Image: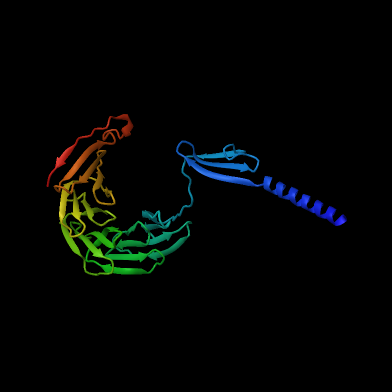
Amino acid sequence: MKKFYALSVLFAFLGYFAVSQNSGKLSQRTTTNYEKGKIVEFSSQATSVNNPMKTITSGKSASINWQANDGYAIGQYVKISGQNDLSVCAWGLNNQRLSAYGNSNVPVWESPCKIYAWDEVTDMTDDGNYVACGYDSTVQVFNASSSDPIWEVSISSCVKGIQISNDGKVFVASFNSATQNDSYVYCYQVGQDTPLWTKSYTGNATALTASKSGNRVVYCEYGGTTNKLWILDGSNGNQLFETAYADQNPPSISYDGKYVVSGNYSGYAFLYEYNEANNPILKNGIIKLTDPIHGLPACLFQPTVVPLLLVL
């Protein structure tokens, strides 16, 4: 009888202890809302998930996860991969180097750039597995996990722009640093020292961009004898289109190379669309973004859209 009484007391105590422990647990649920931003909700066993005991809303403002600083260098080009959380920064002016970062401001690896003529440029594949870097007459490609280049080639001119496509093509824009009036565009396949094709131009290379599929290349010159934008076929370098250009920043291009957007210093953005059917470039619209005289924001003005068809 005593043994049965003792066991009954023990089971009752354990049951009470279990209930107490269960009721003391807190559950946390984090969600995002397009109106409120980040929402963190806390609930206990006794409260409903839809009626939390405490809610914290942090708003829609962005927060800094980490930042990297250099008091003597300038972070000139930054590329980010959303697939492997890799970021690369090309530091210029002083202590020139290429730095790769993960989830903190401590570099995963760094590669010095012995620059004598021009600061380095960089690009990265969408998956973050390969990083391209160019400076002076040097072109390099790195694996994301190592500071040792897996491929390197030298050219006879000074690198001004670099792009790497997801299929391993490297596009390079360069210029003659002595005259600054002779420029080139190269297309390489990673691992091959002989370019697949080369284009030469009279003028000063300013900007370069390419679709990640590798099918379109946009090359620009501004500030010299020629102020133009060219769209090239990424497979062979053939010219598809050219137009006036007045900007120092590279245009943007869609993954498939169908859409190109460029701007100018008068506050206009230009949208171009490639039509495979009859091979024209369609200038979809000319949109006024700012008042070129007063520099006021576009919201104060009625945007102007002018459709125009340009047939090659």
The vertical placement of 103 against 277, above or below, is below
Image location (x, y in percent) of residue 186: 21, 61
Extreme residue toward the left, this view: 312
Return the residue nearer the eye: 198 or 204: 198
Extreme residue toward the front, this view: 1
Query: How many discs appear?
Result: 0
- Kindly tell me whether residue 101 is visible in this rendering: yes
Image location (x, y in percent) of residue 49: 58, 40
Image location (x, y in percent) of residue 133: 32, 62
- Kindly tell me whether residue 225 is visible in this rendering: no
Give me the residue at 22% from left, 44% from top: 272
Return the residue nearer the eye: 269 or 160: 269
Give me the residue at 18% from left, 51% from top: 230
The vertical placement of 255 against 96, above or below, is above
The vertical placement of 157 against 311, above or below, is below
Location of the N terminus (image quadrant): bottom right
Q: According to the image, what is the colour scheme of the structure?
A: rainbow
Give me the residue at 25% from left, 36% from top: 287
Return the residue nearer the eye: 85 or 205: 85
Image location (x, y in percent) of residue 164: 29, 59
